[in-house]
Amino acid sequence: MSISNFPYLSLLLFFPLIGAILLAFIPKKDTLIIKLFTLVWIVIEFLISIPLYFYFNSGTYNMQFVENYSWIKSLNIHFFLGIDGISLFLVLLTTFLMIPAQWSTWEAIDKKVKEFNIALLLLETGMLGVFLALDGFLFYVFWEFELIPMYLLIGIWGGKFRVYATMKFFLYTFAGSVLMLAALMALYFIHGHFTGIYTFNLVELAKTPLPFKWQFWLFLAFFLAFAIKVPIWPFHTWLPWAHVEAPTAGSVLLAGVLLKMGTYGFLRFNLPMFPDMSRLFVPVIVIVGLIGVYYGAWVAMVQPDMKKLVAYSSVSHLGYSMLGMFALNRIGMEGSILQMINHGISTGALFLIVGVIYERMHTRLIGRYSGLAAIMPAYAVMAGIFVFSSIGLPGMNGFIGEILILVGVFKKNIWYGMLLAPAAIFSATYMLVMFRRVFFHKPKPELVELSKQGKLKDLSLREFSYFIPLVLLVFWIGLYPNAFLSKMHTSVNHLISQVHREAPAENISMLTGGKR
Amino acid sequence: MIGSTEYIILLLILLAIGTIGVIIRRNFIIILMSLEIMLNAASGLFVVGSGITGNMSGQLFFLFAAAVAAAETAVGLAIAIVIYRKKGSVETDKFESLRR
Amino acid sequence: MNSPILFYLLAFLLIGSSLMVVLSKDIYRASFWLVGFFLFFAGLLLTLHAPFLALTEIIVYSGAIAVMIIFAVMLTGKYANFELSGYSIAGVLIAAIFIIEIMLIIKDVPEFKNFAFAFASGSNARAVGISLFSGYLFPFEITAILLLVALFGAVVLAKRRKQ
Amino acid sequence: MELVVLLILIFPLTGFLINGIFGRWTKPLAGVVASAAIVSSFIMALAVASGYNSLPFDHIYYSWISSAGFSVPFGLRIDSLSLTMLLVVTGVSSLVHIYSIGYMHNDEGYSRYFAFLNLFVLSMIILILADNYLLMFVGWEGVGFCSYILIGHWYKNPAPPKAGIKAFVVNRIGDAGFIIGLLFIFTHFGSLNYTAIFNNTSTLSVSLATVITLFLFVGAVGKSAQFPLYVWLPDAMEGPTPVSALIHAATMVTAGVYMVARSHILYSMSPISSEVVASIGALTAFFAATMALTHTDLKRVLAYSTVSQLGYMFIGVGVGAYWAGIFHLMTHAFFKGLLFLAAGSVMHAMDGLLDMRKMGGLIKKMPHTAVVFIIGALAISGIPPLSGFFSKDTILAEALKLNHPIIWFVGVVTAFMTAFYMFRLIFLTFFGKSRVPDEYHPHESPAVMVTPMWILAALSIAGGLVGLETAHGIPMKNFLSSTLGFPPAAVVETNDNLLMIISVLMGIGGIFLAWLMYIAKPSLPAKLANSVKVLYSGCKNLWWVDQIYNFLFVKPLWWVSHNFLWKVVDVKLIDASVDDVGFLSAFTGKTFRLLQNGFINSYVTWASLGVVVMLGWVIYSGGIR
């Protein structure tokens, strides 16, 4: 590639960090310059990430734009960056979602604006680091690094119970990632013991599957760490809290990107490195995933608080993504990755929608609203688009992901597919019921007189402008998904071939009693 | 003939008595005294040890222990005096400001 | 020198004096018993053929430490009190179990009937001096500093503030 | 040719975009723009129809989804079946659009209404012209979405949005079944394309075919409001009447019939599922007719009659006479659309009143609507020479010929009931003494509403001729069988004109009974009602189906998820256990803090306790040796 020797990814990675440092020099009080500077910086970051898409060679599955400098020689840890079909779109999603996230908080955040924006930029570096790092240790460093700004975002600028929520979020995820650290170390030594190469290099580690016994424990440890992050059903209770208390930008990024790290972790660690276990654990994960899908939908149906509703819908959507992933076939996998991107866009947008009225009315309770369509028609249309995109209306992005996952799961096992298909009914119910309660019926008297006082204005130009790119993306994926799918094919094929490898014969399969 | 076991048993009994002294008595000075007994018993064991192994370091250790005991008692008593001056008594249950 | 009678006598005296220190109502009497204890302990060291140590014991313990304690006793008022702390039952119990455990353990410790008192031949002081200044010179220096620090500490602590 | 076909799609799309985005500014013209879009699309359809001998036309415009092994192109296909549907859909919708200009005249959601009406027609056309099942599904859900929006058009009052959600969710239940059928097809055939599937059905076992067709039929039941999932159609009457006319009479609800007809090869391969289709059709026809007997709301009666007529179509398609089903679909689109538009004009005149008990003798005030209404009623009751007679009679004849006597009998009885409730409606609203409360002053609707009605009336009359027995077979039958294939030979020997006489008699009998009860002796219905008390109240309360569904499904699901799933499982079990872990560490911290109580004695006690315990452990583990 023409720009192969140019340290492209590290520029992409550290550009926000530089922004954060420069931001420190701007005086605290002129907030407009701070906001403007951050926005411009984020937009430049997005522009930097766009060539990634065009220069990406979808022919080969191995890593591209690779940068590999040795970092800690003694432990053979490298500063190893690279992307492939799987992480390409997650990186683009991150840089893309940062723009509406930051732009939506121009009015919302008034206290400590400078620190807020610095935290946002640090968060961006952390997130990008997780998706770009190909060295286990570096992955872990960025995995922890992005927790801190998120902790601050929720903790300082959050809602009433922010301290409880952020503490819970931080400790819960931290417990998972500590487990992951232990597993990483174990992996490092076991892999070294069996193959003589002591390395954290993910590509290297994925080459030789470990004996069965070790695979079991390592898979379990990584599974737990990522299950908390995804979140998979039993480990999800931190999500509604974190979302309810997070500021809009925090929610958008939390739902849009942070949750994808969990699923991405599965794609980088669990599936390629522990193939036998991934195949063995499919029924377990399918059951948990199905519970997650239905549980998320049903519980979302009864939530009084809009953000909690959308949070539980994320549990449901990511349950879909997990099912697609563990169908262990190419269609399901591509559906799962596309579902991650769709979820990032539609749920991120839904949080922006909730943010808009939260800014005006300072309440998220559905009961307090009614008949907004009459008062804010443009807002109602925008909300409608994203509600229907998250339901999976054909012609929009949600549908493509769902169909691919359904086909993948169905190919894997007819019964799983048949159990999954009716879930779309419930995902429609809770969204439409919320939509009706908030937007239809006569507006409440207090809303009417609020709009008379000019408090309930329709979408301002600023707000309108950060929704437009999201709407375009929703319809672009809906009508022409091949722009995204074509880039994934080779990487997904490689991953699938990795998952279906047999572990070396000498490991007597502990669990299946040697019935291999 | 007196073997090493009798010595060890004696010294350990003394150690036990010293411990009882520290635990039971409420008076800080008495605690210091019983502490001295314990220290003495312990260093005695060293001497017996050096007797068994024939290596001189045991006895030397007795000397060092003695020096440390002296230093420790000095500081202990200084504290006792300061507490007495502040609290008016040397009872251990009086000074429990650490509780809160 | 190490006839059994002497040993048992000293043992009895030692246990007696230490019990008196621990259980006496009056601090005064306790401090005197403590001095006695140190002296009997010096005797015990003699039976262990360690005359130099016995002398150091007399000088350091009964000479310096006991005197200090008596000073402290006088400074802190000498009313007699014999209250047991809240943990007395626990203390006695623990000591009893401790002693039983020693008995159980001690039976497998090898019996050294004839103490090979290698240094019984030459003078104990000489042997101590040689090894002190050859192998243990460094600890010796450190102990000196320790004593100095303790000295300053005690003085600074006990000095009467001017408020 | 490709461009022409694409234009059929592009016109409604542009209509939608213009009205949708620039709605506020194009308010007065919205109706005209929308109707122009649909009419031009109709003209394009005619252009395609003119060159119909070059059918079937199949063209792939771009590859929509091409994931590994699952490639779905955006391809359109026109053959005789989709051409008929296309003409019916675009024709009727253009008439409805023109009618709506008048009907929705001073509605403040004017441009939004026309935008989504155009989008609806677009999705319907996609559904019809799709050349693979997934694209059909796109149209399938798109139509559901538009019906949700259009039913909930007057979102200010509470009922329409609820009805909209009910429609969308019930459709979604059907769609779930449809998707599963679709997945079965894909896993077996490796592609969703019609031609690919229908060319190698030999590999398909009968049992798999039955499974596929049954699941697809679940989708059809959801969409075409058949027995278990019909509850949403009567509620859908909350929407504006032209919407009901277009969506809930002519186009959307017929999608299920079209789908079954389109996959006729699969259905003919599995006798069980066609039996299921026919019997569900018959059951729904009869059941819905009973509910229409006693209803007093003008539009609801028509809604139940639609459900019942759809039952007829499914009988036709179920017994194997696919062309008869489609033929009835076409004629039904004409006369039912007409009836709804007429009902709309009555409603428009009585500004929103629908209760028949407050009407009567309107013929004097609304002659056109009345006459047109009567024509529609005659057509639906199957009185020759109108279209209803031909299509319904053929279905019944085919049913009997293909040895489904019970279904034939149910069909005949339902025909009698249809005639009865239709003319009950006419006598109550248009004849007899006027019970109109004085504040209403009904007047004839404007020309822009009446003309489309007259056109539809003409079609209702002439529509049947296509099904007339001519020298070389029935033109409609030959035309459709190029795609649907000829129905199997008759199994049971019947003589056709006897059948004709029976069905005509049924029609006239129904009319006479209605005349007897509502004009001659108005007291008769009351007497009859309390003589068969239970049956009457059953019909009156629509057999409590809605209440049963609510009681069995909606309420428990809501209760379970609220009290159990959320409050108990989520909050108490999982969340609480996470907090307990936090509390645990806090608790242990608290207890050990108590140890630091400042007493030296306690410290030493604990320390020596430690020594004792360690010694004990040494002893326990075998002493020093």
Image (spheres, coloured by chain):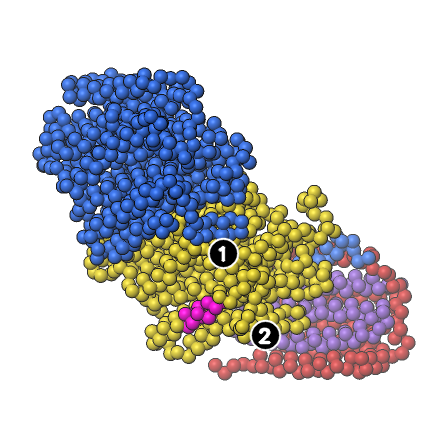
Magenta part of the chain? A41-52
Please name the amino acid that badge 2 sits on.
Ile
Residue furthest to the left: D438
Query: What color was chain B assigned in the picture?
Result: purple
In this image, D475 relative to C140: left or right? left
Give how far across and how far down residue C22 sits, in percent: 67, 64
Please name the amino acid that badge 1 sits on.
Leu
Quadrant in which the C terminus of chain A appears:
top right
Quadrant in which the N terminus of chain A appears:
bottom right
Picture residue at 73% right of the left edge, 70% below the top: B40
Task: Quickly name the residue at label 2.
Answer: B79
Picture residue at 67% right of the left edge, 72% below the top: A74
Query: What color was chain A assigned in the picture?
Result: yellow
Which chain appears blue? Answer: D
Who is closer to the viewer here, A411 or D407?
Answer: D407
Q: Residues within 10 Å of mark 2 (few under 14, many from 20)?
A: some
Helix, strand or loop at mark 2: helix
Query: What color was chain C assigned in the picture?
Result: red
- Image quarter for residue D526? top left
Say whether residue D236 is magenta.
no
Establish if B39 lies above or below D372.
below
Give how far across and how far down residue A92 sits, in percent: 47, 64
* Residue D148 visible in the picture: no
In this image, D236 relative to B90: left or right? left
Predominant secondary structure in magenta? helix
Label number found at residue A77: none
* Residue A359 visible in the picture: yes
Who is closer to the viewer here, A118 or D516?
Answer: D516
Label number found at residue A485: 1
